[in-house]
Image: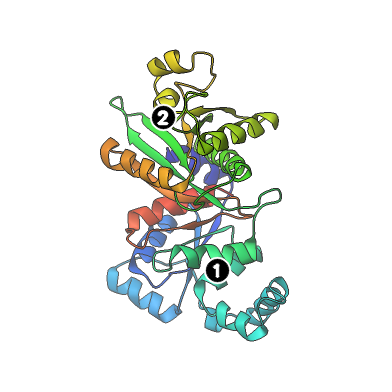
Amino acid sequence: MFESLLKILKENRRTLVLPEGEDPRILEAAARLKADDVLDPIQLGDVKKVEELAKKHGFNIKGIKIIDPHNYEHFDKMVEQLFALRKGKMCKEDCISNLYKTNYFGTMLVKMGLADGLLGGATYSTADTVRPALQIVKTKPGNNIVSSCFVMARKRQDGSDEIYVMGDCAICINPSEDELVEIANETARTAKIFGLEPYVAMLSYSTLGSGKGDSVDLVKNATAKIKAQNPWYHVDGEFQFDAAFSPTVAKTKAPNSPVAGKANTFIFPMIEAGNIGYKIAQRLGGFEAYGPILQGLNAPINDLSRGCNADEVYQMAIITAALK
């Protein structure tokens, strides 16, 4: 799975901000990223503390850029830019106070073009990672929301990767029809980055009219809107999961669908279904879950679990950098 991402990074060198630079997990991952020559990490934090911590744990961070917001030579310029961006919503003092926090400081580095992306959340909450992104980087033109997906991967018996993408499982609680359209479009793009030709199934408890209800209408109408846009990817629905996934079931429930039975990208009608669904696949199906991968922003910014380990930081760093 990571071969396609590493190819992207080899062809396009990327710089990634790691706001929690004083965390040993982040330090270990940054050292590995540098040693493997995958990307250029920027560590945020007190330079002396970072160097002492690296020495204590035996991490080689030679050549890694470390920036302390409290001693940044262009801090005043950054304050002015943030004040202009948040005019009427943040006073000058608030801008200064926020930029001393590495989550805001790191996001401004991305906004100013000094880094390609950001990976945070090892100690910050999801809200503290997403809020600066929404306020500073903002959503892409044509997008109104930030959504998320998980990439689910496991090894087949022949050693090849079995990969699926599921969204939204972490951000949008009860998406509207138009928000489901955005989620599907962005999740298809993410699937493409991971080397998949997206076959997108819009999921429900109904298959092509077999059930009734408001949520069925929601998915059905969102699917119709996507098809009217003439998407570049294959999409169909509404589907129950078995009809979307199983070729045998698809022959009975949706024999004429171009997606049923071969879907690899699954769009859930609400976060409750998505969160439960990906965790079932993870725990019962033995899939590794990579994410949540944030979608719809003007730059790649992703959120780690506060229970992450260095391996997960390393993997999510590669994913984040490749998304640009």
> Which quadrant of the rendered structure holds the N terminus?
top left
In the picture, the disc for residue 241 is 2
Q: Position of residue 77 (x, y in %)?
A: 69, 78
Taking the image as shown, residue 284 lies to the left or right of residue 266, namely: left
Q: Residues within 10 Å of mark 2 (few under 14, many from 20)?
A: many
Q: Amino acid at mark 2?
A: Phe
Taking the image as shown, residue 109 lies to the left or right of residue 292, namely: right
Q: Is residue 215 above or below residue 141?
A: above
Q: Is residue 94 above or below residue 310?
A: below
What residue is shown with label 1? 106
- Dot 2 falls on a residue whose secondary structure is helix
- Mark toward the viewer: 1 or 2: 2
The answer to which of 256 and 194 lies nearer the viewer is: 256
Q: Position of residue 211 (x, y in %)?
A: 47, 27
Task: Tell me the residue at 59%/49% (across/down).
Answer: 324
In the picture, the disc for residue 29 is none
Q: Amino acid at mark 1?
A: Gly
Q: Position of residue 172 (x, y in %)?
A: 52, 51
Task: Tell me the residue at 61%/40% (across/down).
Answer: 181
Q: Residues within 10 Å of mark 1 (few under 14, many from 20)?
A: many
Q: Position of residue 244 (x, y in %)?
A: 45, 25
The answer to which of 247 and 10 lies nearer the viewer is: 247
